[in-house]
Image: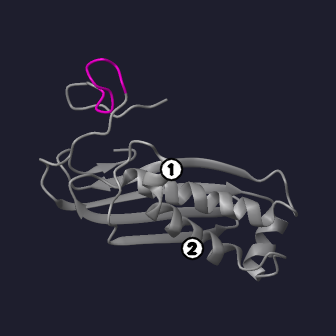
Amino acid sequence: MARKASKDGALTHIDASGEARMVDVSAKPATERVAVAEGRVIMSKATLELIVSGNAKKGDVLGTARIAGIMAAKRTSDLIPLCHPLALSKVTLDITPDKKLPGCVVRATVKVTGPTGVEMEALTAVSVACLTIYDMIKAVERGVRIEGIHLAEKKGGKSGHYRAGD
């Protein structure tokens, strides 16, 4: 399990006695923070065509997944025990069908002005959007794979700008 570490290497969600704790962010300044996460849903070409054509039995797969991802970002602190509840100012979900995969690329961008970042909200949005795509097409194809969910970029806060692969 990955744990959040401070610049000195100490785990910020673990206190001196080794117990889990919610980090105190009350002394941190409110700054604009943005996080972008990505993931992929891999499927057969036939299933992707069903999604793109709008003929899936359960309805608009991509529209439903987009709404599910946005809702999930807003509920992240209900799902991840030590996450702070945040007043998000922006959540966007871009879902792009890709015939080369074949499948869909899911990308979430989340923004807040506050004392803590929105990486978990972006990752949660992508995860739930990918799961929603799976749920809506599982009757057609059970072998669908969700892959590569990761933080693609983070801006703002004390640690500055991060971009995957840099």
User: Percent from the top left, x then y, of residue 132?
Assistant: 67, 63
Say which residue appears at 20% left-offset and 46% top-offset: 25
User: Taking 94 as reference, is 112 left or right?
Assistant: left
Q: Is residue 102 visible?
A: no
Q: Quadrant of residue 106?
A: bottom right
The C terminus, quarter of image = top left
Q: Is residue 17 visible?
A: yes
Which numbered tag is attached to residue 5? none
Residue 135 lies within the magenta run = no
User: Percent from the top left, x then y, of residue 42?
Assistant: 71, 55
Which three-letter amino acid code belongs to the residue tagged 1?
Leu
- In magenta, the rendered stretch is 11-19
Secondary structure of residue under mark 2: helix
The numbered mark, 2 or 1, whose residue comes first in the sequence reads 2
Secondary structure of residue under mark 1: helix
User: Taking 40 as reference, is 58 left or right?
Assistant: right
Above/below status of 23 relative to 37: above
User: Percent from the top left, x then y, of residue 69?
Assistant: 54, 65
Say which residue appears at 44% left-offset and 64% top-offset: 74
Which tag is nearer the camera, tag 2 or tag 1?
1
Which three-letter amino acid code belongs to the residue tagged 2?
Ile
| Residue holding disc 2 | 67
Which is more toward the observer, 45 or 32?
32
Which is more toward the observer, 13 or 118?
13
Between the residue at mark 2 and the residue at mark 1, the CA separation in whole angstroms equals 17 Å
Residue 12 lies within the magenta run = yes
| Residue holding disc 1 | 79
Say which residue appears at 21% left-offset and 44% top-offset: 159
| Residue at the outermost right position | 140
